[in-house]
Amino acid sequence: MKNKKANFDFEKLEVYQRAVDFANIVYEITKNFPKNEQFGIVSQLRRASLSISLNIAEGTGRYNNPERRQFYRMARASIHECVPLLELSFRQDYIDLKQHEKLKQECVELAKMVSGLINSLPTPD
């Protein structure tokens, strides 16, 4: 986070901060994708990457754990959605191997962190 005060609890979460960083990287790299992909891979990858932090934020704002859990699961699903989009981006030579590996590894780390967030919620008896 760029030296900004965290006004909301979710802004203090490392997983939220990393999700925003991930989306920012996706936005940067997709600027170089072909124009004919603007409404294809670019749009889909940007929406999926942004959805991770959005669902974490929205889940944190919910008043009960089942609703929180559902939004965190949607965040994890959005991470999974990024994986084939990154793979196709690599196969189409829109990103190089180094970018692909770095972004995929970040997906792995984010998925673990979101799973930890899910598992930290108490389950109903």
Image (cartoon, rainbow, N blue to C red):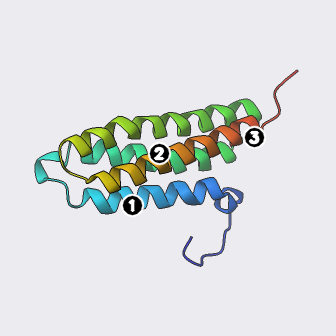
Q: Residue 75 falls in which quadrant of the image?
A: top right
Query: Disc number at residue 25?
Result: 1
Q: Which of marks 2 and 1 is in front?
A: 1
Q: Where is residue 83 in the image (x, y as percent from the top left)?
A: 39, 38
Q: Where is residue 82 in the image (x, y as percent from the top left)?
A: 39, 41
| Earlier-in-chain disc, 2 versus 3 | 2
* Quadrant including the N terminus: bottom right
Q: Position of residue 69 (x, y in %)?
A: 68, 33
Q: Looking at numbered disc 3 in the image, what kind of residue is underneath it?
A: Tyr
Q: Looking at numbered disc 2 in the image, what kind of residue is underneath it?
A: Ser
The structure residue drawn at horizontal position 52% and vertical position 43%, both measured from the top left corner, is: 108
User: Is 89 on the left-hand or right-hand side of 101?
Assistant: left
Q: Label 2, label 3: how many angstroms apart (C-alpha)?
A: 20 Å
| Earlier-in-chain disc, 2 versus 1 | 1
The structure residue drawn at horizontal position 39% and vertical position 50%, both measured from the top left corner, is: 101
Query: Disc number at residue 63?
Result: 3
Q: Label 2, label 1: how many angstroms apart (C-alpha)?
A: 14 Å
Query: Disc number at residue 51?
Result: 2
- Neighbour class for label 3 at 10 Å: few (<14), some, many (≥20)? few
Residue located farthest toward the top when viewing the structure as drawn: 125
Q: Label 1, label 3: how many angstroms apart (C-alpha)?
A: 31 Å
* Looking at the image, residue 109 lies above or below residue 70: below
Query: Disc number at residue 80?
Result: none
Circle 2/circle 1 CB separation < 8 Å = no
User: Is 10 on the left-hand or right-hand side of 47?
Assistant: right
